[in-house]
Amino acid sequence: MFRFAAKLALVMLMGFQTLNAQSVWNEKTAVKEALRFLQKVEDETIREQIKITEIPAPPFKEGQRAEYLMKRFRDLGLHDVRRDSEGNVIAAYPGGGDGPLLVLSAHLDSVFPEGTDVKVRREGNILKGPGISDDSRGLAVMLAVARALTLHKITIGGRLLFVGTVGEEGPGNLRGVRHLFEKELEEVDYFISIDDVGLKTISTAVGSNRYKVIFRGSGGHSYADFGIRNPMHALGRAMAGIADFQVSSRPKTTFSIGRVSGGTSVNSIAHTVWMEVDMRSQDAEELDKLDRMFKKTVYKALVRENRRWSSGDTLTVEFVTIGKRPTGTLPEKATILQAVSRADQALGIESQYQPGSTDANVPISMGIEAVTLGGGGDGQYKHSLQETFDTTDSYIGTQRIFLAVLELLGVR
């Protein structure tokens, strides 16, 4: 990948012909200065990223990080800074016109439980800390974009909202962005979620169904009560059946049993056991097909265990929905994808389109043009205590999102 100075010279030589003619980038000195600025202050953006990471934001407890984001929004001169009733942080860019409305978003929450050590360690270009990539990077980039716009007094042709959402990660079930579109905002034209790292573009929303499956029975002593119906055995039958599923590879469809628990002791017949199951697909019909097969297999396991033994309480099973994410795919000619593509061309980036499951699932499923963009840099071990972020040329991700915003809204 070209370093910025060399690439900027090349783009200027081309007269910014790769960009939208309506934006007349070659005449917008402020835009060029803002791009240089984003590279120059990347170390500050990374320090912001570290600071955000070290503010705990476990599921359903994002308040401390939300307060920090509100303060930063106000420091940057954004207007109407507030938290909605679900906990999302919302702010408006003051330099907008009356054109289309774009929401630029990153999520506040992490997957790590309360009490996790979130201290960030640095080893050269590598930052290590839980949540350093997902999604502290997204929040830091969002703040950097706001900073560049306000400092260089760029007047955009449309309206721009900055949003820090709650509940993006698994337990949250996209509660923040659902609330945003159901209760807070009307007539949103475009939505960009900054999530994770790299220079990817997620344009296909991977849907998911997640359940907690609970088997119950009377329970008893492993020797004295041997022969009664055993919820643990029913669970085992169900797990074995699920493990043998054959699913579609195109569209990609997956399943996983993520957690299993229950029972009292090694010498007891359990009275209650449970498993948590995650199923995903890029296609709604395939996901529904898998869902039906899953439930049929669980009920079959229940019947087999109840028939296997003649004593003890008849076993029961309960399905508790713990998450549902909708599917959807943008058309190839979607305006938002064209805008991102032009930004990629300007920066010498080869566009990388892939499926994913993020806040953008909700607007895509509603027919609103939405994408998820990586925040630049690179990283490994996401959702683990060993999560990393590689800062090498990470400023390019910030520049890319900045340009994509201006491509969509135009510069007046």
Image: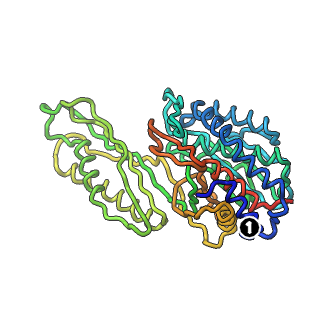
Question: Which residue sits at x=80%, y=61%?
Answer: 410
In the foreground, 151 or 313:
151
Label 1 SS: loop
| On-image quarter of the C terminus | bottom right
Disc 1 residue type?
Answer: Leu
What residue does disc 1 label?
19
Q: Is 17 left, or right, of 355 in this rendering?
A: right
Q: Quadrant of residue 19?
A: bottom right
Q: Is 114 left, or right, of 155 in this rendering?
A: left
Q: Is 89 left, or right, of 307 in this rendering?
A: right
216 above or below 16? Answer: above
Residue 321: where, in percent of width, then height?
46, 48
| On-image quarter of the N terminus | bottom right
Can residue 212 be spotted in the picture? yes
In the foreground, 235 or 367:
367
Residue 337: where, in percent of width, then height?
65, 66
Q: Is 209 left, or right, of 66 in this rendering?
A: left
**Total marks in image:** 1
Question: Which residue sits at x=68%, y=57%?
Answer: 6
112 above or below 200? Answer: above
Residue 293: where, in percent of width, then height?
35, 62
Rate crowding at label 1 as few (under 14), some (14 to 19) or many (20 or more) other CA atoms within 10 Å.
Answer: many
In the foreground, 144 or 297:
144
Question: Which residue sits at x=49%, y=40%?
Answer: 388
Q: Quadrant of residue 97?
A: bottom right
